[in-house]
Amino acid sequence: MAPLLHNRVFRRLYAAQLASLLGSGLLTVALALLAARLAGDDAGVVLGAALTIKMLAYVGMAPVMRAACERLPRATVLVGADAVRLAMVAALPLVTQVWQVYVLVFALQTAAATFTPTFTAAIPAIVGRREEYTRAVAASRVAYDLEALVSPMLAAALLFAVPTSGLFLIAATGFAASAALVGSVRAALRASVPPAAPTLPLHRRATAGLRIMVSHRVFRGLIAANLCCAAATAPVMVYSVVYVHTGLGMGATALAVLLAAGGIGSLCTALLLPTISRIAQPRAIATAGALTGCAALLLTVVAQLAGLTYPALLALWFVTGIATSLMNTSAPRLIADHTAPGTADDVFTAQFSASHAAYLIAYPIAGATATQGAAGPAILLGVALIGLTGAALAWRPAAGIRSATRRLPTRARVATPT
């Protein structure tokens, strides 16, 4: 990490990511409190709908916004996304109806779906050597994991000192700081890799990244790995409340510690990634993550049948965090290794949408089976095995060798995949 901090552009962009993530984390808590105040007993339904809208915005709007903003420099896109979120936060204290919450959630998450892939695509353009890029990806993953651990605790602490509306103001400060930091390195970002001039209709540009992913085996394997990752993650996000409160009769503190176990596993893995990457290729790391995720799901089934215990859940969620981090941190390296500059942004955006689309499959399954005992994790294990099998077939040695020896051509040549 230390060598990266000598890179002025990366240092400021990383600080912008941290500020943006902090704003998003605090805003998530503030939105939950706002929904509870507006909906009363129906707060759970409102929050469930808001999360669904969030995923739909991630899946559907990321490629559309990529195509719409293609002519713009990356710095302009990043600052614009922060400005939109800043404006939406300013409107949140004025919300008085549940439907207004839904509209603002969609707008906010559309902005997030614009910011994140653009930021991810900018990293290989400003970090030169492969080893430094691996460190940058790991640092970015650490930021996401820290946000997941710190934001809820920080929000809870702030609520002792400020009203709910104060969280809106602090979140807005995070977005404003992110925009200012990106603006300070605008010239460097503009000089990195200029966006290609669009030559295709909007719908073709919006689907360019997905068509590239579907047409090449290395990326088809990544799509399959996304399914495995989502199936492994779903129990942590959906079953934790049921296991802790209903199954074990424990309270909120136990739930927070259990969720933190998954984040700590992911965080530790991200910190070790630069070392792991010296001895293993991205495909091997992602496959190891998929195998670990399937093993965690299998052990969850066994734990359900044998009788749940809290220490066993802590260990399982920790292992699941390791698995998901191995898969998630491998994706940016695979894309950077197998795309040309003219197509990288498209593929990063397509991966952002594809990874969240997998959650639209896994989360409903987990929700529908949350009270069905071992059947829930068993079904998710089946989904994860489908993803693992698809990735293994796509990344089998012969295909992997062919894919690794070439980079994808420019978009003009891959716009109509074969």
Image: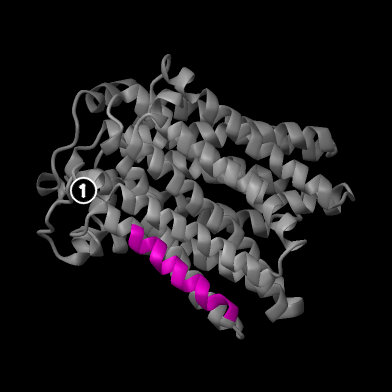
Does 411 appear in magenta? no
Residue 336, by quadrant, is: top left
Q: Position of residue 416 (x, y in %)?
A: 14, 51
Q: Which amino acid is tagged 1?
A: Arg
Q: Residue at x 36, y 38 (%)?
A: 10
Q: Residue at x 66, y 73 (%)?
A: 34
318 lies above or below 255: above
Q: Residue at x 53, y 46 (%)?
A: 230
Q: Nearer the viewer, residue 93 or 65?
A: 93
Magenta highlight range: 79-93
Q: Is residue 212 left or right of residue 287?
A: left
Residue 224, by quadrant, is: top left
Quadrant occupied by the C terminus: top left
Toward the right, the furthest residue is 249
Q: Residue at x 18, y 27 (%)?
A: 406
243 lies above or below 270: below
367 lies above or below 388: below
Residue 384, by quadrant, is: top right
Element class at badge 1: helix
Q: Residues within 10 Å of mark 1 (few under 14, many from 20)?
A: some
Q: Position of residue 225 (x, y in %)?
A: 45, 38
Q: Is residue 330 left or right of residue 25?
A: left
Q: Position of residue 310 (x, y in %)?
A: 83, 38
Residue identifier under label 1: 190
Secondary structure that dominates the magenta span: helix
Is there any visible trace of residue 294 in the rendered image? no
Is there any visible trace of residue 262 in the rendered image? yes
58 lies above or below 39: above
